[in-house]
Image (spheres, rainbow, N blue to C red):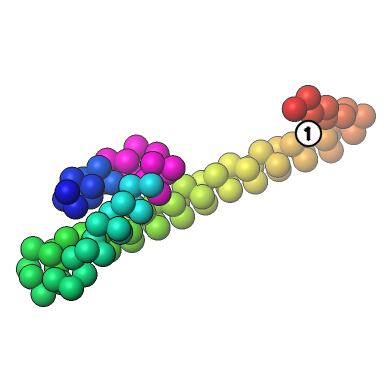
Amino acid sequence: MLVNALTELEDLMKQKKYADVAQKLGVVKQISATFQGYTGVPRIAKLWRRINDLQGQLRSQLEIDFDSLYASSSLFQSLSDSFFELHPGHECTNQA
């Protein structure tokens, strides 16, 4: 069950379905807590390392995606500011 949940977590991470990743990571942590006392068993220790590795990969992936989003947002803001500097009489209307 834990192995399957980890595989599903990896697939969701590749697809960047972060809402599903969060839910599946919660499941993985809940299941893995059951095995906490058995980390001396090689197979369990290997799964714990895999969980820690996936969490590290997820942190890195989220940081990269956040930085990309922030850079895109900053670029958009810079372009928007430049536009309004070049066209001072033009007003932005937000119909949201």
Front in this rendered view, residue 65 or 3:
3
Image vertical order of residue 46 relative to residue 69, above or below: below
Q: Is residue 15 magenta?
A: yes
- Which residue is pictured at 31% across the width and 51% down the height? 27
Image vertical order of residue 61 relative to residue 92, above or below: below
Q: Position of residue 39 (x, y in %)?
A: 15, 71
Q: Position of residue 51 (x, y in %)?
A: 25, 59
Name the residue that disc number 1 marks: 83
Front in this rendered view, residue 19 or 55:
19
Q: Name which quarter of the figure residue 82 lies in.
A: top right
Residue furthest top as drawn: 95
Residue furthest left as drawn: 42
Amino acid under disc 1: Phe
- Which residue is pictured at 58% across the width and 48% down the height? 70
Front in this rendered view, residue 40 or 66:
40
Q: Is residue 75 left or right of residue 1?
A: right
Answer few, some or many: residues within 10 Å of disc 1's Cα (few below 14, many 20 plus, some between 14 and 19): few
What secondary structure prevails in the magenta region?
helix
Q: Is residue 62 magenta?
A: no
Q: Secondary structure at mark 1?
A: helix
- Which residue is pictured at 7% across the width and 68% down the height? 42
Q: Is residue 51 left or right of residue 42?
A: right
Q: Name which quarter of the figure residue 73 lies in.
A: top right
Question: The C terminus lies in which quarter of the figure?
Answer: top right
For the record, the magenta segment spans 10-22
Q: Name which quarter of the figure residue 86 lies in.
A: top right
- Which residue is pictured at 70% across the width and 42% down the height? 77
Q: Is residue 2 left or right of residue 27?
A: left
Instruction: Let me know if residue 37 appears in the view.
Output: yes
Image vertical order of residue 93 relative to residue 35, above or below: above
Q: Position of residue 17 (x, y in %)?
A: 40, 39
